[in-house]
Amino acid sequence: MEAVAEGLGLLLDPFNIALILGGVVIGVLVGALPGLSSPMAIALLIPFTIQFEPVPAISMMAALYCAGTFGGSITAILINAPGAPPAAATALDGYPMAKKGEPGRALGLATVSSVTGGVFSLIVFIFAAPLLASVALEFRPQEYFALAVFALSMLASMSGRSSLRNLISGAVGVLIGTIGLHLTTGVERFTFDIPELEEGINFVPVLIGLFALGEMLNQSQVLDKAFERIRATATKLPSIKELKELKFTILRSSVLGTFIGILPAEGSTVAAIMGYNEAKRWSKKKEEFGSGTPEGIVGPEAANNAAAGGAMVPTLALGIPGSGSTALILAALIMHGFRPGPYLINETPEFIYAIFGAMLVANLGFLVIGLVGAKFFSLVTFVPSRLLWPAVFVFSMVGSYAYGASMFDVWVMLISGIVGFLMMRHGFSPAPLVMGLILGKLVEETFSQAMIIHDNNFFRLFESPIVLLFFALTLLSLSSPLWALFRDRRRAAKEAT
Amino acid sequence: MSKETDGAGGVEDARSSEGVARLLHPVDTLLAILILCIVAWLYYETTQFEEVSDLLTQNIPPQMFPRILLVIVALLALVMPFEHILLKRKGKDIDKDRRAPVKRIAWVTMAALVAIIIAEQWLGTLLTMVAVCLVIPLLWGERRLRFVLPFAVFFPLCVAFLFSVVLGVYFDPGVAGVSIR
């Protein structure tokens, strides 16, 4: 109880509240603008917030993360261009409903279901995170190593075009993490006589380059893309009758989204797609999907916002990111000197309560924005790309420079951005690379410790049932694309007969 | 007769080479070769790491973990040329984003950004920001100078104020000596 009071005390500082609300506004803006994304905004925010105390810094990022997921629905509904990938499923029914002359109703449904999903997942978060952390406290290096390997294997089922490429990106991320002095021997690895590389590659410029510059180069090719806009009307709250009809869809999606969020590496995009599919599967009016049915809006919206809260559970309780955005929050925690994981929750529980409070405030914040300001926020799409993206680059440049006051980091950002842009063209997503980069140190450290404990006998790691469980899950996760293919073929064969 | 056999063999050869071509995705094959070359180079680099005594390494030498990763990347890269078959069955189009070549403007933007960052040592951070805000919009075809000029002046000033004055970050004034502090 003392920790709850202390956490709320930290949260209720006027400066913190201002930062959280700032995070909500930035999040909705970034979410609403096609091309800009929450991971990009969080990456750009890290150098800015590094000067603050950890609670306000992480609270602002968590608020931005929640609001960014919601913001994408505004443009998905009004211009059929999801501002963020998790809102892509919302556009399937949101835009047709808006086109039928009910944009206010579509925005209202999206807002209410988003807040419900978000708050539901936060309730799960506040109970599940300490519980999971208490279990994880018993983990030894071998169990932690197996858990980290399982998290990396989940990249195979992460959203993106290719599981194989996600795994390659993840492995490359872990490899980048090995650059610099070896922890136990002090041997230089992959430094190529560049003194700046001795301490390893700084996270921030890589993250900024991959998410901001990579996307900027992508956007440079579609500068004249025009959107058909639907004039926004005032947001209309769904009636009690309508909510009663939709309650099971919202609840189902909230549970599903939270669960998917808790799984390592799975994020809001997967949750939204599954939320939409499940809403359709359980619906009595399947044929209306795609033509503006309310279930097609609340299903993905409740799921993607629930995934945001769910993803914070493994991030804070285990130090294993639940999504691309939480991987960046994890990087920020590390930069603030924390080692995310069970010890963080056990030793500083007030910190977790403060983050929980910040996310709750963020949900209430975007409820207000959704109901009152959606019309205004939809105007951000009028900002000319030709000025917006150079502004993003200026922030990228200064953000990369600010952390270490080094132009070397600006070069790292530039190279990461160009490589990231070329990688994206060939189906490699930046999120798995970031996950690998952030988990890299943990994987190597725990692997070395586990091997030393077990006299360098890898097979002795399997003496632990937890290790066995995680490796079994790893195998399942790696084979999931093949299982999915097998299932699809069986279904197709069934339909043919 | 022998001619006929040659002909049949020729058709068979052509068919089998066509089959192999269908199995291997040409762009992904090139990508896989590139990745394998980088892996080979980095693997060689691991052989150049400083030697340390076993007592210090506790049998976990510094090159061990990077080598495991390099082998994993190499194995995954070997599957890449065939991945399109699986993706096609799942209805995914791996070539969607790369079918059209990279537009000239993207290469020009890259070159301009590299040139501006090289010039930073002379321009200093503030003027570099001004250069980005002026050059990129013009390069991207923005001709409304009434928007571009104020943007190129005031936006960098605001960013410099935020980072330099509020957050206390030191900005290089460059040879030109222009700084907000």
Image: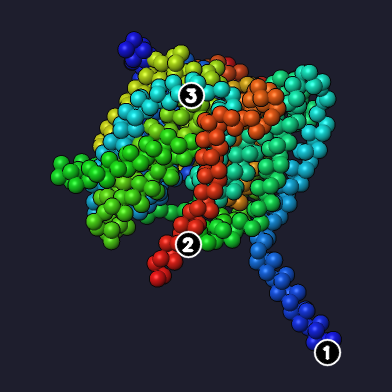
The residue sitting at the left extreme is A241
**Quarter of image, res B180:** top right
Q: Residues within 10 Å of mark 2 (few under 14, many from 20)?
A: some
The residue sitting at the front extreme is A463
> CA gap, disc 1 to disc 2?
46 Å
The amino acid at mark 3 is: Ala
> CA gap, disc 3 to disc 1?
76 Å
- Which residue corresponds to mark 1? B1
**Screen quadrant of the C terminus of chain B:** top right
- Same chain for labels 2 and 3? Say yes or no: yes
Q: Residue at x 58, y 35 (%)?
A: A149
The scheme the figure's colours follow is rainbow
The amino acid at mark 2 is: Arg
Residue B82 image position (x, y, % from top left): 64, 58
A3 vs A370, nearest the viewer: A3
**Quarter of image, res A445:** top right
Residue A374 image position (x, y, % from top left): 30, 39
- Which residue corresponds to mark 2? A489
Q: Residues within 10 Å of mark 3 (few under 14, many from 20)?
A: some
Q: Residue at x 28, y 52 (%)?
A: A282
Q: Is residue B49 left or right of residue A59?
A: right
Q: Chain of mark 2?
A: A
Residue B154 image position (x, y, % from top left): 50, 29
Q: Residue at x 76, y 46 (%)?
A: B37
- Whether A189 is drawn above or below A292: the answer is above
The amino acid at mark 1 is: Met
Q: Chain of mark 3?
A: A
> Residue A136 has which mark?
3
A423 vs B156, nearest the viewer: A423
Q: Determine whether the residue tagged by mark 2 lies in a helix, strand or loop.
A: helix
